[in-house]
Image (cartoon, rainbow, N blue to C red):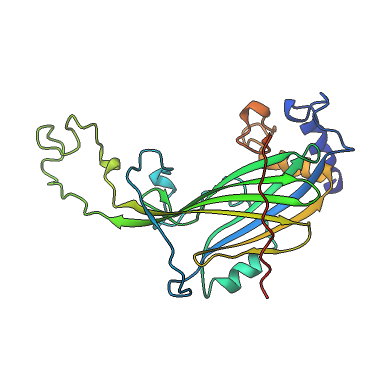
């Protein structure tokens, strides 16, 4: 029965608008991969190169996660890769690197390209969260050509700490004395213990064949990339499992998917990869 599960999942997914028989997915041209990315922070003092962080003048447009997602200011926030209990090729590497560096993100994606030239975009955040603000946010655009071309944009934040105002328990329910009942619109949950103060914006490009681990070097942020080709049916079954709703057991349709497999036109500037010795 277990052997038939991927078949049933594939058939179920094919009946949804995402993979409906409308000519969008052609098995002769479509290609599927499992994509993996490990991002880590080098310790301070590892490089003499000056790294230029810029001031953050406003936090209005920054990602801020719900407070309940924090757990001692560390939270796994990626909805696809981090929620999965499956191991990745970088798990052993993460355990080894953990002794010397700070692991920011360990991502896993199921990628289905309709044809050569298609690009898939994914977004992710770091495991480290301070007062709802991820220490690292990023997006990656992966283009299928003769090679797999990756275009990555990182934003790494340094934080300032703030002193929480003291509230008299006897007057917290008094509207005239309550600090959070003024016309400012602030609530207790709006008070910040930490706030992004400086940001490093980093752009990395890479081109690689599948089944090869690539290292993208930088004095502050290090990145490992790996793509493994898989069967189209297996990829469709994996996406079906990732998007299956616990209430009904059915896969979400195209309109309900949250960037599970977005395809868009993009021109990617490719730099030769840095291969560590």
Would you identify the image quadrant in which residue 163 lies? bottom left
**177 left or right of 97 in image:** left
Would you identify the image quadrant in which residue 31 lies? top right
Residue ID at (45%, 57%): 128
Can residue 5 be seen here? The reply is no
Can residue 266 be seen here? The reply is yes
Residue ID at (40%, 49%): 133
Residue 245 screen position, x and y as percent: 64, 35
Residue ID at (67%, 51%): 150
Foreground: 151 or 180? Answer: 151
Task: Judge whether 80 appears above or below 200 on screen.
Answer: above
Foreground: 5 or 19? Answer: 19
**271 left or right of 191 in image:** right
Extreme-right residue of the structure: 28
The quarter of the picture where the C terminus appears is bottom right
* Count of numbered circles on the image: 0
Residue 94 screen position, x and y as percent: 60, 67
**82 left or right of 21 in image:** left
Residue 12 screen position, x and y as percent: 78, 32
Residue 248 screen position, x and y as percent: 66, 31
Residue ID at (68%, 61%): 273
The quarter of the picture where the N terminus appears is top right
Task: Judge whether 87 appears above or below 257 on screen.
Answer: below
**190 left or right of 127 in image:** left
Task: Judge whether 200 appears above or below 142 on screen.
Answer: below
């Amino acid at each position: 029965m277990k052997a038939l599960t991927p078949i049933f999942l594939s058939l179920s997914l094919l009946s949804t608008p995402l993979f409906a028989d409308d000519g969008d997915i052609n098995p002769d041209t479509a290609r599927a991969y499992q994509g993996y990315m490990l991002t880590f922070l080098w310790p301070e003092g590892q490089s003499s190169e000056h790294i230029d962080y810029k001031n953050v003048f406003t936090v209005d447009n920054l990602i801020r996660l719900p407070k309940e997602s924090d757990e001692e200011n560390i939270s796994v926030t990626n909805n696809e890769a981090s929620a999965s209990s499956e191991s990745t090729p970088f798990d052993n590497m993460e355990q080894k690197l953990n002794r010397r560096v700070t692991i920011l993100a360990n991502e896993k994606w199921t990628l289905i390209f309709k044809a050569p030239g298609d690009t898939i975009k994914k977004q992710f955040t770091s495991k480290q969260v301070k007062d709802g603000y991820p220490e690292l946010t990023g997006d990656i655009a992966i283009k299928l050509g003769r090679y797999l071309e990756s275009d990555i944009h990182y934003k790494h934040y340094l934080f300032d700490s703030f002193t929480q105002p003291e509230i008299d328990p006897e007057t917290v329910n008094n509207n005239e004395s309550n600090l959070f009942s003024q016309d400012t619109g602030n609530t207790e949950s709006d008070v910040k213990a930490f706030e992004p103060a400086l940001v490093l914006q980093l752009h990395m490009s890479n081109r690689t064949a599948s089944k090869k681990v690539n290292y993208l070097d930088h004095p502050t942020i290090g990145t490992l990339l790996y793509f493994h080709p898989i069967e189209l049916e297996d990829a469709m079954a994996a996406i079906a499992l990732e998007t299956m709703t616990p209430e009904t057991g059915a896969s979400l349709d195209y309109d309900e998917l949250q960037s599970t497999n977005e395809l868009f036109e993009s021109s990617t500037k490719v730099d030769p990869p840095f291969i560590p010795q």
